[in-house]
Amino acid sequence: MTLSVIVIAKNEAEAIGDCLASVAWADERIVLDGGSSDATVAIARSQGARVEVVQDWPGFGPQKNRALDLATGDWVLSLDADEQVSSALRSEIEKVIGTPGAFAVYRMPRSSCYCGRELRHGGWWPDYVVRLFKRGEARFSEDLVHEKLVTDLPVGTLTHPLRHATYTTLEEALDKANHYSSLGAQQAFERGERATLLSALGHGSWAFFRTYVLRRGFLDGGHGFLLAASNAQATFYRYAKLWLKRL
């Protein structure tokens, strides 16, 4: 059985090298670049990956399906540019695809860092993500953001975590909160959803409470508070932007 690794990227020069190096053992590595202005493409090609470049941006789900359509392996592993596969997870993946079993789709835990600290609460652990599947047995949803892998098959669970260097600085976290809230507002608008400033405030407050209290983000100290505040900000602005679109 062969394995294709697919990655979508844009301006990921700082992360793409480590991502691809962690899966250098795969039979095929495909990077679909969305028109980077940095060295992402050059670094990916220097790592031996197949790189395709497109200039338009249809959204995260459609872009990942584009990358999936380029894959030729029996199995597919989808990674984000800031994710890495550990040696333990590699061994587990190789065992799964080398030995026929009950599952054709697998999820795995993901260990994420926020501003330099690995978090274990606030909804960030074990943070299971469905990423490994037999080609043809799953596709990504067409969502602009927060896309999901869609399948009718039962999903197995791997043990070892995927490493995720999600936000290296607070500035990056704030930039992505702004970007993702815009995409989320557009997606909600297209679905006919509505919002008010009061509902935006309520959703933002609930996001903070859920992250910091219900999901025990306070156990991660100051970093847990920053995560809760960031989630609250992104949620508030998503609904505030949706409200503005309806004016």
Image (tube, grey):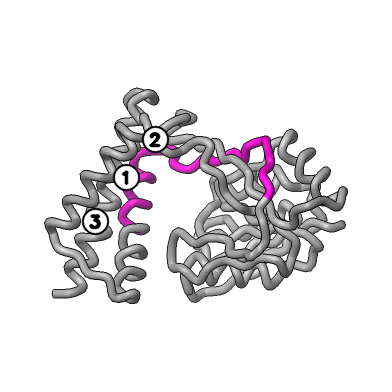
The answer to whether 110 appears left or right of 48 in the picture is left
Q: Amino acid at mark 3?
A: Tyr
Of circles 2 and 1, the one toward us is 2
Q: Is residue 164 magenta?
A: yes
Q: Report the label total.
A: 3
Quarter in which the N terminus is drawn:
bottom right
Q: Secondary structure at mark 1?
A: helix
Q: Looking at the picture, tell me which residue is in the foreground, 135 or 172.
A: 135
Q: Which residue is mark 1?
A: 231
Q: Which residue is mark 3?
A: 237
Point out residue 121 in the picture as x, y percentages from the top left corner: 43, 31
Q: Secondary structure at mark 3?
A: helix
Q: In percent of the image, x 18 and y 74: which residue is there?
A: 246
Upstream in the sequence, badge 3 or badge 2? Answer: 2
Q: Amino acid at mark 2?
A: Gly
Q: Which residues are magenta?
A: 156-179
Q: In percent of the image, x 38 and y 45: which residue is there?
A: 172
Q: In percent of the image, x 23 and y 51: which residue is there?
A: 203
